[in-house]
Amino acid sequence: MAENYYLPRSGPMPRPENVEQGREVLKQEAFDAPNVQNISFRAQEFTAVCPKTGQPDFGTVEISYTPRHKCIESKSLKFYLWSYRDHGAFCESLAAQIADDIMWAIEAATVKVVVHQTTRGGIELTTEAIREYSS
């Protein structure tokens, strides 16, 4: 278990040390859910690294979820997604890991994550992961 790490309430955001730290912050910054049925985020400046070439992969991440008891705080989501900037991962595994991490952080009723990788070498790639809470 990583140590507790909270984001500052104001001022510049610190750079994440790794994806695990981003994941912990996602959980620690979660807040009580109001009576809403769906929440959606669209991160248009997502960057990860190709594990084969080390080159950056750019794209968009769309996250929608139905909360049960907790919600994702948007600043913590920015921090979490930023933690992928130097992380090597295939687009297919990114959608799955992000969906799993959100379920771990807030135990949502449902989570859908879609990762759109910007065209590279003439090929566009979109991956989708869906998770449902089971007790």
Image (cartoon, rainbow, N blue to C red):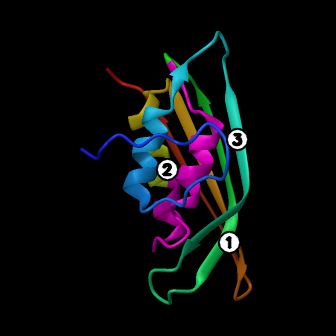
Q: Which residue is mark 3?
A: 41
Crowd around label 2: few <14 · some 14–19 · many ≥20 (10 Å): many
Q: Position of residue 8 (x, y in %)?
A: 57, 41
- Residue 103's x, y, as percent? 44, 35
84 or 99: which is nearer to us? 84
Left or right side of 74 for 91: left
- Secondary structure, mark 2, is helix
Say left or right for 31 vs 61: left
Rounded to the nearest angstrom, the CA distance separating label 3 from label 1 is 17 Å
The C terminus: image quadrant: top left
Residue displayed at 54% across by 22% down: 31
Q: Amino acid at mark 1?
A: Phe
- In what element is the residue under mark 1? strand
Residue 34 inside the magenta-drawn segment: no
Q: Are marks 3 and 2 in contact (CB under 8 Å)?
A: no
Residue 14 image position (x, y, % from top left): 55, 56
Type of amino acid under label 2:
Ile
Residue 58 shows which numbered tag?
Answer: 1
